Image (cartoon, rainbow, N blue to C red):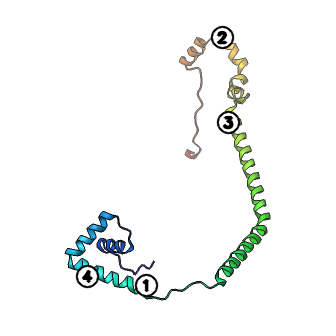
Amino acid sequence: MNDDSPELDGDTLQLVAYLDGELEADERRTVEERLGTDEVYRLEMQLLQGAWDALDQLPRHSAGENFAHTTVAMIALAGEQQQTESQADAPRRLRRQWLGGLIGMAAAAAIGFVAVSWSLPEENTQLVEDLPVLENLDAYQQVGDLDFLQGLQEAGLFVEDEVTDDSAT
């Protein structure tokens, strides 16, 4: 349909439906009653009826005998072309399917590896965290108890490392 065609109002649409025989009996009675009382409505009906009559006067064209044959031939030719293109594209489609499958399997394996390595605790993690304690275990065993170390700390016998500022010199 063309965008330049005028839009029909409700009355015109109702009259077109009336002329096409698309109205129910009560709607048809309402239109006929209004045609009897409304001059403008009746004039619009007469104009539409004239257009309908003019359309009936136009010559009707029928398809020739070859129309069905040529249409079927065109459809068959289009089908053959589509089948040929599909067969030519089949190896490429098969390669894409294999490549997609391989990529999917590799992604699944990578995700599985990450999930398993993340969820299972590593046996040596605790040992690595405790390494500084284990390196000095002999010295810690000679101390005896914690109260002795706290007493040495309060007496100021532990020297804390001072941070030297090389840029000040």
Instruction: Judge by depth and name the residue closer to the eye, 20 or 105.
Output: 20
Left or right for 94, reference 32? right
Q: Nearer the viewer, residue 69 or 4?
A: 69
Along the line of sight, which residue is nearer the eye, 53 or 114? 53
Task: Report, in whole angstroms, how far the alpha carbon at label 4 lies from the one at label 2.
Answer: 119 Å
N-term mark: 2 or 1: 1
Discs 3, 4 touching: Cβ within 8 Å: no
Q: Look at the numbered discs 4 and 1 and tell me whether their residues touch, using CB distance below 8 Å.
A: no
Marker disc for residue 18:
none
Q: How many neighbours does mark 4 have within 10 angstroms: few (below 14), some (14-19), or many (20 or more)?
A: few
Dot 3: few (<14), some (14–19), or many (≥20) neighbours within 10 Å? Answer: few
**Mark identifier at residue 144:** 2
Count neighbours of disc 2 (C-alpha within 10 A) and say few if under 14, some if 14 to 19, many if 20 or more: few
Disc nearer the start of the sequence (3/2): 3
* Circle 2: residue type: Gly
Image location of residue 145, percent across then percent down: 62, 11
Q: Quadrant of residue 138?
A: top right
Callout in the foreground (4, 2): 4
Of pointers 4 and 1, the one earlier in the residue sequence: 4
Name the residue rendered at 68%, 38% in the picture.
Answer: 115
CA gap, disc 4 and disc 1: 20 Å
Nearest to the eye among marks 3 and 4: give it: 4
Which of pointers 3 and 1 lies earlier in the amino acid sequence?
1
**Please, is residue 155 above or below residue 93 in the view?**
above
Image disc number at residue 56: 1
Measure the alpha-carbon separation of dots 2 and 1.
119 Å
Residue 43: image tag: 4
Residue 118: which numbered mark, if any?
3
The furthest residue to the right: 91
As helix, strand or loop, the secondary structure at mark 3 comes to helix
Instruction: State which quarter of the image contains the N terminus.
Output: bottom left
